[in-house]
Image (tube, rainbow, N blue to C red):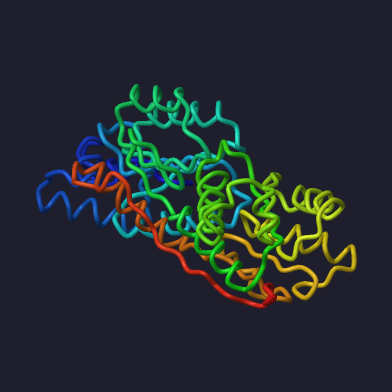
Amino acid sequence: MNKTIADIAQMAGVSKSTVSRFLNGGSVSLDTRRKIEKVVKATGYVPNTFAQSLKAKRTNIIGTVVPRLDSFATSHTLMGIDEELRSQHYQMLISNTSQDVKREIEAIYEFARQKISGIILLAAQITDDHLTAIRDISIPVLLVGQQHEQIHSLIHDDYRAGYDIGAYVLSQGHREIAYVGVTERDVAVGVQRKEGFRQAVRDALPAACYTDEAMRAAGYDIRYYETGFKMSDARIAASAILDQFKPSLMVCATDNIALGVINAAYSRGITIPSDLSVTGFGGYDITEVIHPALTTVQYPYMEAGRVAAQNIVRLVEHKTVEQVTVMDYSLIERESVDKR
């Protein structure tokens, strides 16, 4: 059986409050400390830090709210958070909301009831209900992956990444392009990446190309589509696109979408990249080992998690943190883009 504080106190011949004070780093005499340490070592006692933290005014636990667990970006961000928090003697508690905004709000309040020291929030969007909850709990909150003027945020430079991928594919001679994005409710993935790409196209066009007709007259045919985040959704969307449009390249807002596009292309006998070039965003491990390897924007998700953990600990400890922390990225040129 697991020993309790009461058991340790009885075996050491001291009170429960003395053991509790010892475990929480409080002041006890040297003789008493040695007695308790001896019993702890002999029994292999491990304190229930969660139970302890619920009794404390301030805990060493950071709550992390995530929209989904079956995501490369989320899992690698969490690994970085956990690694850094442990190095600073904090622990991470995860609440998965399955992309349900109501559950995100509930998780924020629940963490506050558990006396969590701080919250790292990975959310696709920030609503008025989020802002109300954050004001109500009066606990430091760090937003990761999105940016909001009222919340300390850590973001990837999605706009500039979108611009760079756009400039790159245009430099390879592609003029008939399908951009396959996601809902604009997700500002980072659905808006910033697309707008960065769109600006790269504008900068490459003659000044008079303000309309689709003028663009086509200049030899450009750029069309924008929307799909879900799942590979299966992207496969269906890509099939529908290829029924009506024959682009030389598809720019995909995530690597998962790119993989769905590649699958749809192969099912139609379309060869990558000679018939159709494809790019993604994310830098998932699988994009390097598939054939052809995927040209993509690689985000440092684990490093972002580490920096997020550092920032939330600084906020918990009332230290200065930049309002917005921007992570860098790398454009990885691989085999999935052909030169035209």
Compared with 132, 270 (above or below) is below
Residue 310, position in %: x, y?
30, 54
Q: In this view, does 242 lie to the left or right of 129?
A: right
Q: Residue furthest right?
A: 268
Tell me which residue sits at (65%, 57%) in the image. Answer: 252
Residue 172 image offset from top left, x and y in percent: 62, 73
Name the residue rendered at 41%, 54% in the picture.
Answer: 81
Q: Give the camera-side residue of 120 and 234.
A: 234
Q: In this view, does 196 lie above or below 55?
A: below
Q: On screen, 128 above or below 323?
A: above
Q: How many labels does the image show?
A: 0
User: Which residue shows up at 59% across the image and 52% down it?
Assistant: 209
Q: Is residue 224 left or right of residue 270?
A: left
Judging depth in this view, the residue of 316 and 266 nearest the camera is 266
Q: Nearer the viewer, residue 79 or 89?
A: 79
Q: Quadrant of the C terminus?
A: bottom right
- The image shows residue 59 at horizontal and vertical percentages of 30, 39
- In the image, is 122 to the left or to the right of 280? left
Residue 124: image location, x then y, percent:
53, 40
Q: Quadrant of residue 282?
A: bottom right
Left or right, residue 269 beside residue 1: right
| Residue in view at x 51 percent, y 69 percent | 331
